Image (cartoon, helix red, strand yellow):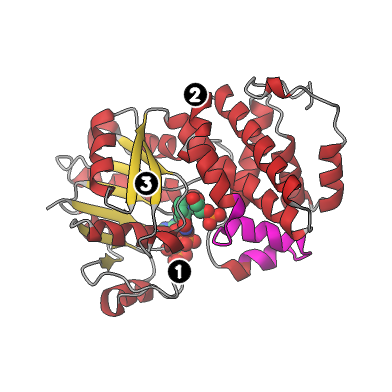
Amino acid sequence: MTKITVLGSGSWGTVLANLLVENGHHVLLWGRGEKEVQEINTQHTNRHYLPESTLRPQLKATTDLQAAIAGTDAILFVVPTKAIRSVAQQVAQQLTKVPELKPIIITATKGLEQHTNARISEIISHEIAANLRQGVVVLSGPSHAEEVIKDDITTLTVASKDVPSANWVQKIFMNDHFRLYTNNDVTGVEVGAALKNVIAIGAGIVHGLDYGDNAKAALMTRGLAEMTRMGVSLGADPLTFSGLSGLGDLIVTCTSVHSRNWRAGNALGQGRKLPEILADMGMAVEGVYTAKTAHDLSIAQNIDMPISESIYKVLYEDADLKTEVINIMKRKGQSENELMRPRLSGESE
Ligand SMILES: NC(=O)C1=CN([C@@H]2O[C@H](COP(=O)(O)OP(=O)(O)OC[C@H]3O[C@@H](n4cnc5c(N)ncnc54)[C@H](OP(=O)(O)O)[C@@H]3O)[C@@H](O)[C@H]2O)C=CC1
Ligand SMILES: O=C(CO)COP(=O)(O)O
């Protein structure tokens, strides 16, 4: 039987662990909260993150990282972006004690690290030396935990430079309601996953401000153009952004009431303040964190990202929402044919 360790007992980590149990694997879920771990083990629930769901009784959780990793075939990271590096360092320490283990590493986290601008797989590959593991595989795509837990139909992308590892991950997750497609464009998949969260905050803002469907379609389409421009400047294939991890995830995050990013934006649009919104949410709102990285990256890469930049100003500089919308609309006229071309920030859209 395949043994899989899942790191992060929040909404997505718990649901992915539950799905792997459904697929017949031996799964150990690692969380940092003793109370939550006990609840999963004894009551088969995780009420804070999945209030209305019952988990499979075979799903076991622990706060002991060494025990979680013992004898494992794969380690799946599902902690928020800001925790990835420290958790990867803890994992590396444990793997050094058992160098013969060499698990496949999977990440389902969506974000870009602040200060380094690093993608999640870059952080993990850097912190966990290649001799301690097999390939690093990225799991991404339109997938709200709230629907996956109900066995609703979901399709994802599984991206890696290491084809056998990607194929293995595809196999362990697939079933009749959860379908995965492999992809070798890791940069494109991870950049799309991270930047769509920023655009989704914008979609929530537009809704909260009571703009109509035309505005929402415009935001998603031009948001996708920004994501693509940035991805291409970092070496991604532009076509990846038309796939599940790009357009697919952008659609679900910009339109679903399950999206924490959309809900945070919607609350901002309705006039609420960010600290209060985040405190009430009690879950990761990755787009807030990634908006800062997107701002820094757009300067570092010399790429124009007017929508993401306005969202950054709203989140980090308390800019007025309606003024930002008007500023975006009043920019100089542009040609849509330039969609895919990495644009210099000097020649504004
Ligand atoms: N929810 C979803 O539907 C989806 C989420 N994702 C992505 O998955 C990632 C995780 O999101 P999600 O599960 O929703 O987030 P949640 O906020 O639901 O859960 C985060 C979990 O990570 C734990 N955690 C936070 N910091 C640390 C740390 N330093 N060490 C150990 N554990 C830590 C939290 O523990 P504690 O409770 O103690 O704070 C909590 O269990 C994000 O990048 C998100 O974008 C991707 C697809 C779908
Ligand atoms: O990535 C997700 C869906 O694919 C989850 O989005 P939110 O973090 O906005 O809920």
Question: CB atoms at circles 2 and 1 under 8 Å apart?
Answer: no
On whether residue 262 falls in the magenta region, the answer is yes
| Residue of label 1 | 49
On whether residue 106 falls in the magenta region, the answer is no
Mark 2 lies on a secondary structure that is loop
Query: CA separation, marks 2 and 1?
Result: 35 Å
Give the mark nearer the N terminus: 2 vs 1: 1
- Cβ at disc 1 under 8 Å from ligand 1: yes
Mark 1 lies on a secondary structure that is loop
Examine the rendered structure and indicate whether residue 57 appears above or below residue 251: below
Residue 341 figure quarter:
top right
Residue 140 picture location, percent across and down: 43, 43
Direction bottom: furthest residue: 43
Q: Residue at x 85, y 32 (%)?
A: 331
Give the amino acid at mark 2.
Answer: Asp
| Residue of label 3 | 88
Is 300 positioned to the left or the right of 186 in the image?
A: right
Q: Magenta stretch: give its range.
A: 254-278
> Which class describes the residues within 10 Å of circle 2: few (<14), some (14-19), or many (20+)?
some
Residue 258 picture location, percent across and down: 54, 61
